[in-house]
Image (spheres, rainbow, N blue to C red):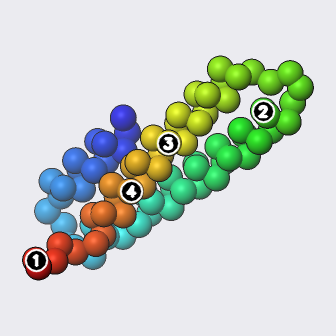
Amino acid sequence: MMADGFLDGIRRMSGTAGDDEREIRARIEELRQEHRDLDAAIDALISATPHDQIQVKRLKKRKLWLRDQLSKLEDLLIPDIIA
């Protein structure tokens, strides 16, 4: 999916660490916004009677995928600490 390719691109980049971090933070914000938008879409679908349960399931799966991508990106921002 798109964010996986984005993560690979970030890992291959030869730019400065600051540039990488800015790009990661920008992508995180994009994904968070999409996550919020999905929340609103799911709420709107559920409030409609009758609602399309298959569409709600698809949106919820997308939301979970976004959450996973956000976690991966956020992990890139945390420095590895050798214990």
Extreme residue toward the right, this view: 49
Mark 2 neighbour class, 10 Å CA radius: few under 14, some 14 to 19, many 20 or more: some
User: Is residue 20 toward the left or the right of residue 45 in the image?
Assistant: left
Of badges 4 and 1, the one in the foreground is: 1
Q: Position of residue 51 (x, y in %)?
A: 80, 24
Q: Amino acid at mark 1?
A: Ile
Q: Amino acid at mark 3?
A: Leu
Give the secondary structure at mark 1.
loop
**If you read the primary sequence from the N terminus, does the residue marked by circle 2 or circle 4 appear first?**
2
Q: Amino acid at mark 4?
A: Ser
Mark pair 3, 2: CA separation: 17 Å
Mark pair 2, 1: CA separation: 47 Å
Q: Residue at x 50, y 61 (%)?
A: 29
**Residue wearing tag 3:** 64
Q: Residue at x 87, y 30 (%)?
A: 48
Q: Amino acid at mark 2?
A: Leu
Mark pair 4, 3: CA separation: 11 Å
**If you read the primary sequence from the N terminus, does the residue marked by circle 4 or circle 3 appear first?**
3
CB contact under 8 Å: marks 2 and 1: no
**If you read the primary sequence from the N terminus, does the residue marked by circle 2 or circle 1 appear first?**
2
Mark pair 4, 1: CA separation: 21 Å
**If you read the primary sequence from the N terminus, does the residue marked by circle 4 or circle 1 appear first?**
4
Q: Position of residue 16 (x, y in %)?
A: 19, 72
Give the secondary structure at mark 4.
helix
**Residue wearing tag 4:** 71
**Residue wearing tag 1:** 82
